[in-house]
Image (tube, rainbow, N blue to C red):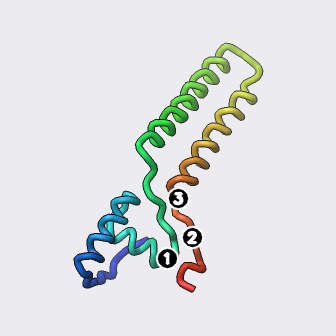
Amino acid sequence: MLHNIKKNFWFSKKEDDMLKKKADLCCLSEAALVRMLVMSFKPKEAPPKEFYTKINELNMVGVNLKQLIAKANTLGFTDIDRLNKVVARIDELTYDIKCCYTKPEKDVEFWQ
């Protein structure tokens, strides 16, 4: 989405500190946080660093499996489809986990 309209806001020191703190907790810029709130999304706090370590490990398992599939395919093994399904499930699981912990939720009743 193109952001081409500039808005200026006045905040008290307390409000400014709260905005900075909440934006930092979500790993967002202050402008991104305000835009998200205006669009009725509830941002989530950034997960701990261990989360990203575990996601990277899960991705590496998928990469290793893909390499094994390529090798098995060249050697003529026949159960490649089953291995491809496992890789697809790992990719799906990784996406689901990321969404669960990082994707903001739309809350249409937020402003009601």
Q: Nearer the viewer, residue 84 or 29?
A: 29
- Residue with the most extreme left position: 13
Q: Is disc 2 placed on a helix, strand or loop?
A: strand
Residue 31 sits in quarter: bottom left
- Residue with the most extreme front position: 14
C-alpha span from label 1 to label 3: 14 Å
Residue 91 sits in quarter: top right
Q: Which residue is mark 3?
A: 103
Q: Which residue is mark 2?
A: 106
Classed neighbour count for the residue bearing mark 3: other residues with Cα under 10 Å, few (<14), some (14–19), many (≥20): some
Amino acid type at image mark 3: Lys
Q: Is residue 82 left or right of residue 8?
A: right
C-alpha span from label 1 to label 2: 8 Å
Where is residue 37 drawn, in percent x and y? 45, 74
Classed neighbour count for the residue bearing mark 1: other residues with Cα under 10 Å, few (<14), some (14–19), many (≥20): some
C-alpha span from label 2 to label 3: 10 Å
Q: Residue at x 44, y 58 (%)?
A: 45
Q: Which residue is mark 1?
A: 39
**Sequence-earlier tag: 1 or 3:** 1
